[in-house]
Each structure stands twice: as structure tokens, then as C-alpha cells.
Image (cartoon, rainbow, N blue to C red):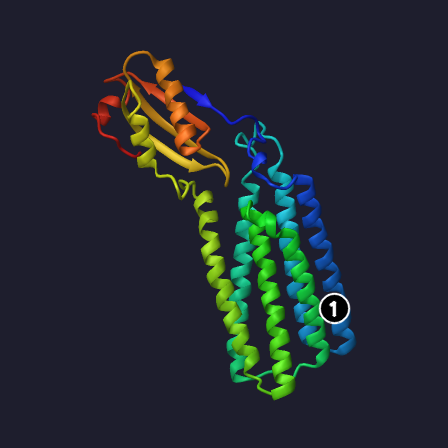
């Protein structure tokens, strides 16, 4: 049986455009800014007697928690593999993304329900204090978004936290617009209508983004690679009579693994070398486990020359 592993547990780190420690510092900065804002909003809410402000503070706290989860997952993901976690800890980031997207879906369902109930019972006029604090919240959300935006392109985990933040920013914009419209024109339906629109947008975005996360956790093949295509490419290598029992899955968002039974006639070593080169160059698969079978032996007889997915 032949094994081919990536170059050490940190083989995926070169995909990051940002130094991991600098990235950690950005996320930590974003957490600090959000916690400060939460505190300021609670104080402002108590002083002005505004429940809306305290509610927004709790919303912001959820943002900080999303970033704490993302930060912890980044740290865990960089741990080297060991006897317990033989693939390494990279999936910690996928799990964190799953937690954050799930909480976003729950928040958006809650916002939608809240919006619908307010349609029938429009809120009291929010004071300028609420509008001003929402503006401060928006600035903090934009600072957080700026800190995590470039990292969100490289990481499912940070992307989930970034979207959490964007949802927060959208809510702040809604509070500002609704507050101003209500104060000037006293059109109170604007608040629930905006709330419903934002809730639906967050829900749509979350469902779109959670799919690749579920795919990885369910040991699915990468979206751009099909097991059938890999089997066909392997079968085209000289000396390979058949490829079957093929399993293709993502270890984490940057590494893909394949295992397969390969029927080889003639000398094994050059054929295996060629197979690994095809997997690397055509499909970017550096982690392969290939079980070699002689023609007519093992399950090669059962396969009877037909490729089958086990």
C-alpha cells in the first residue's frame, strides 16, 4: 500500500496571504473593538432607558463571540498533527464556520419574526440617541469588516465571522435609516420592513455559504473535482488496467485526499510514481493512498474491469 502525504502538518499555511500571527492580531483587535462597543451600548442604554440600545448591545456581543470562536479555531487549526488527530487540526476552522453560520441562521429567523410582529404593532419613535449610537456601531462594524475582509477570502472560518459582522452592519444601517425616517416623517412601517428585508438577505447568504462547510464535514468531494474524473485520469496511465473503490474527500478547505484500488500489470513503482504525478498536477491532490492489486486478484476479479464507486 502506498501513502503520499503533504509536506508536514503545516503544508497548507503557504496559502495564507497574511502571516498567521498578523492575522491573529487583526482578529484580536476586532474582538476588542466589539467588546468595547458592547460595553458602551449597555451604559448608553441604561442611561437613556432605551431597550433598543441594550438589544443592539447583545447583538454586538454575538458578533464578538463569533470572532472569539473564529480566533480559537485559527489557533487550534495550526497545531501539528499527532497520534490522536492524524490529519491534523485543520477542520477546527470548518467546525467554527458551521457554528457561526448556524447562529447567523438562528439570528436571521429571530429578526424575521420580530419584523413581522412589528408590522402589526409598529414601534415607538426611536430618539436621536439610538440613531447616533447605531451610527457608532456601524463605524465599529466597518472597522471590524476592514480588519477581517482580506482574510475572509482565504478562510471559511473567517468568512463566517466576517458575514456575521456584515449582518450586524446591515442591522445598524437599518436602525439609522428607520430612525431618521420615523423622526422626520413618522412613517413607522419602515422599521419592520427593513428588518424583514435584512433578515431574508442574511438567511439567503448564510444558506449559500454553509453548503461548502457541510460538504467538507460530510466527507464530500471538492466542488471542482469529481471522483469519476479522477478514476478516468488514473486509468489512462500506462500499466493501469483498472481503478475502483475510489474515495475522494476534503480533509479541510485546502487539502484533498483520495484512496483507491488500482490494478497494475507489470512493474509497480514507475506506474505509482506516474499516478501520483497525475493526481498532483491535474487535481492538486497531494495526499493519496493507493492499494495495488494484481490482475484477477483481490477485488479486481469482482470488479471485472468495470469502474465502480464503493
Residue 275 x, y percent position in the rendering: 37, 23
Please report the residue visible at 65 percent of the width from the left and 45 percent of the height from the top: 72
* Residue marked by disc 1: 42
Residue 77 x %, y %: 60, 39
Q: Is residue 294 visible?
A: yes
**Depth check: 287 or 14 in front?**
14
Q: Position of residue 219 (x, y in %)?
A: 43, 40
Q: Residue at x 55, y 70 (%)?
A: 111
Q: Which quadrant of the structure image shows residue 301?
A: top left
Left or right relative to 135: residue 277: left
Whether residue 111 is situated above or below residue 236 in the rendered picture: below
Q: Nearer the viewer, residue 172 or 295?
A: 172
Which quarter of the rendering shows the N terminus? top left
Label 1: how many Cα within 10 Å (few below 14, some 14–19, many 20+)? some
Q: Secondary structure at mark 1?
A: helix
Q: Is residue 162 above or below residue 236?
A: below
Q: Is residue 61 visible?
A: no
Residue 17 appears at what percent x and percent y?
A: 60, 41
In the image, is 167 to the left or to the right of 243? right
The residue nearer to you, when weighing 218 against 250, is: 250
Quarter of the image for the C terminus: give it.
Answer: top left
Is residue 302 or residue 36 the one in the foreground?
36
Amino acid at each position: 500500500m502506498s501513502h503520499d502525504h503533504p509536506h508536514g502538518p503545516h503544508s497548507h499555511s503557504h496559502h495564507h496571504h497574511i502571516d498567521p500571527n498578523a492575522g491573529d492580531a487583526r482578529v484580536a483587535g476586532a474582538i476588542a473593538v466589539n467588546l468595547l462597543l458592547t460595553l458602551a451600548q449597555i451604559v448608553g442604554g441604561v442611561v437613556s432607558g432605551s431597550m433598543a440600545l441594550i438589544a443592539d448591545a447583545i447583538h454586538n456581543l454575538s458578533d464578538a463571540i463569533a470572532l472569539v470562536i473564529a480566533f480559537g479555531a485559527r489557533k487550534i487549526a495550526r497545531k501539528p498533527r499527532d497520534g490522536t488527530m492524524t490529519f491534523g487540526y485543520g477542520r477546527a476552522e470548518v467546525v467554527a464556520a458551521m457554528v457561526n453560520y448556524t447562529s447567523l441562521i438562528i439570528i436571521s429567523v429571530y429578526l424575521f419574526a420580530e419584523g413581522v410582529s412589528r408590522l402589526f404593532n409598529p414601534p415607538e419613535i426611536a430618539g436621536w440617541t439610538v440613531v447616533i449610537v447605531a451610527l457608532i456601531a456601524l463605524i465599529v462594524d466597518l472597522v471590524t469588516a476592514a480588519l477581517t475582509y482580506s482574510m475572509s477570502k482565504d478562510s471559511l472560518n473567517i468568512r463566517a465571522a466576517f458575514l456575521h459582522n456584515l449582518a450586524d452592519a446591515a442591522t445598524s444601517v437599518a436602525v439609522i435609516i428607520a430612525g431618521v425616517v420615523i423622526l422626520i416623517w413618522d412613517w413607522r412601517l419602515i422599521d419592520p420592513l427593513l428588518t424583514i428585508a435584512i433578515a431574508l438577505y442574511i438567511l439567503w447568504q448564510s444558506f449559500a455559504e454553509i453548503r461548502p462547510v457541510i460538504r467538507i464535514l460530510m466527507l464530500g468531494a471538492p466542488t471542482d473535482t469529481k471522483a469519476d474524473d479522477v478514476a478516468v485520469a488514473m486509468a489512462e496511465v500506462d500499466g493501469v488496467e483498472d481503478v475502483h473503490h475510489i474515495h475522494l474527500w476534503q480533509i479541510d478547505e485546502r487539502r484533498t485526499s483520495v484512496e483507491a484500488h488500482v490494478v497494475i500489470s507489470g512493474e509497480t513503482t514507475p506506474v505509482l510514481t506516474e499516478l501520483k504525478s497525475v493526481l498532483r498536477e491535474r487535481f492538486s491532490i497531494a495526499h493519496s493512498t493507493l492499494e495495488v492489486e494484481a490482475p484477477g486478484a483481490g477485488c479486481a476479479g469482482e470488479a471485472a474491469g468495470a469502474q465502480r464507486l464503493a
